[in-house]
Image (cartoon, helix red, strand yellow):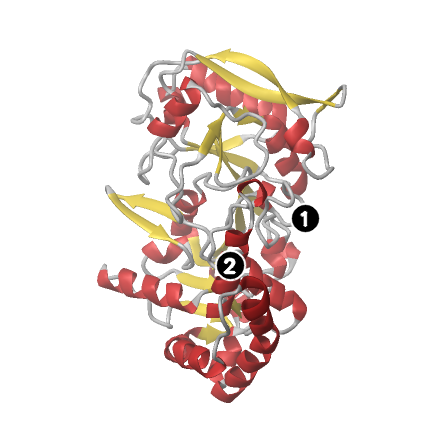
Amino acid sequence: MANIVVFGSQWGDEGKGKIVDILAEQASAVVRFQGGNNAGHTLVVEGEQCILHLIPSGVLHPGKLCLIGNGVVLDPVVFCQEVDKLAAKGLDVSPTRMMISKKTHVIMPYHRLIDSARETTKSEAKKIGTTGRGIGPCYEDKMHRCGIRACDFADPELLREKIGKALEEKNVLFKHFYGVGELDPEAVFAEVLPYAERLVPYLGDVSTAIQTAQKDGMVLFEGAQGTHLDIDHGTYPFVTSSNTVTANAASGSGCSPRDLHRIVAIVKAYTTRVGGGPFPTELLDADGDYLQSKGHEFGATTGRKRRCGWLDLVVLKESVRLNGPTELAITKLDVLSGLSELKLCVAYEYRGETILYPPQEQNGMGHVTPVYESMPGWDEDISAARSWGDLPVNAVNYLRRIEKITGVPVGIVSVGPDRVQTF
């Protein structure tokens, strides 16, 4: 059975969690391969909402192996909180079905402190829009080769030593640059130790687990954020701190790229963005308010209001180029019901030229003018649609136009938040 990678094709919040939850029914294992608890995957099953930040969305399916790969940065406090909440719902969250790679880097209290201190010292214009959860500083330590890895939790003396070493430099910043006071290494060690003891039973060799799982069936790879928040390919510097593209599914989980077969691009039927950064098709009018209100566009992690705009096919074509999807999964198509006219951004005007892909200069996206193509909308409520034949002609035409411009077929359509509102 072909393994599947699910990725977000825009700036995140496309509905990856729901699609992963649906596809997980066919999988033997679900792997999270990048990001941290700055992602929020909202699932609705039989009317009950569940928001996950770290644990793979497949956890709602009994018996599915849930793996957290080495490309993730893991907050042990958040992980334990999610385990406790899911256990209270009667779900099996034991180490027999959940595993954390020993190579996964761990978010420490000083990472969160650095994150919040940095953002506080910036002017509003220069703020990235970070969630303040220590994601970036943890990835920095990983690249600086002074990070705490999950395997260090099994060796308390090594953990104590590495915390002390990390704080030698960071305490200078805390005291003299950020003015928040030094952290006591022993106090940090004491704060982390109880969580370390809880995590140790979950540690394992995720690479081997993936290798074994794909012999029994399909492995599903789940990313966080969206392609245009990728640290290399996104709207830098308004990006996340990891690679969100599908190529990272292999390196972030510990398998071969040859193990990635079916690649599903999650595409919201319009475009949203949380936080700072350029957004060419953003709507600051009644249509934008309509999308925000009807789509309930608030961040699952932060609660922040999402910026809304028309579907940007320039952004989507770049995602196709970077990720090589085999199909598109269109989400929130139902939100567009009631709009008499829909617009698709098919190109940009930039420095006197018409371009079909985003400019690569810093803040180039902040200086483009979208070129729109208009299509008639529809009034019908499509939330009960269960096949293409149930959709209004104009909704079908909208989907077909997306296929035509991107060159990728639509394989999944979502017309509401519940599992059953998908075909």
**Circle 2: is it few (<14), some (14-19), or many (20+) Cα within 10 Å?**
some
* Secondary structure at numbered mark 2: helix
Give percent across and percent down for residue 322: 66, 41
| Residue at x-position 31% and y-position 59% | 62
Residue for badge 1: 232
Q: Which one is earlier in the sequence, the residue at label 2 or at label 1?
A: 2
| Residue at x-position 33% and y-position 25% | 385
Q: Amino acid at mark 1?
A: Asp
Residue for badge 2: 117
- As drawn, 404 above or below 32: above
Q: CA distance from mark 2 to mark 1?
A: 25 Å
* Secondary structure at numbered mark 1: loop
Asked if residue 147 can be seen in this view, the reply is no
Number of numbered discs on residues: 2
State left or right for residue 27 relative to residue 316. Answer: left
**Circle 1: is it few (<14), some (14-19), or many (20+) Cα within 10 Å?**
some
Q: Amino acid at mark 2?
A: Ala
| Residue at x-position 55% and y-position 81% | 164
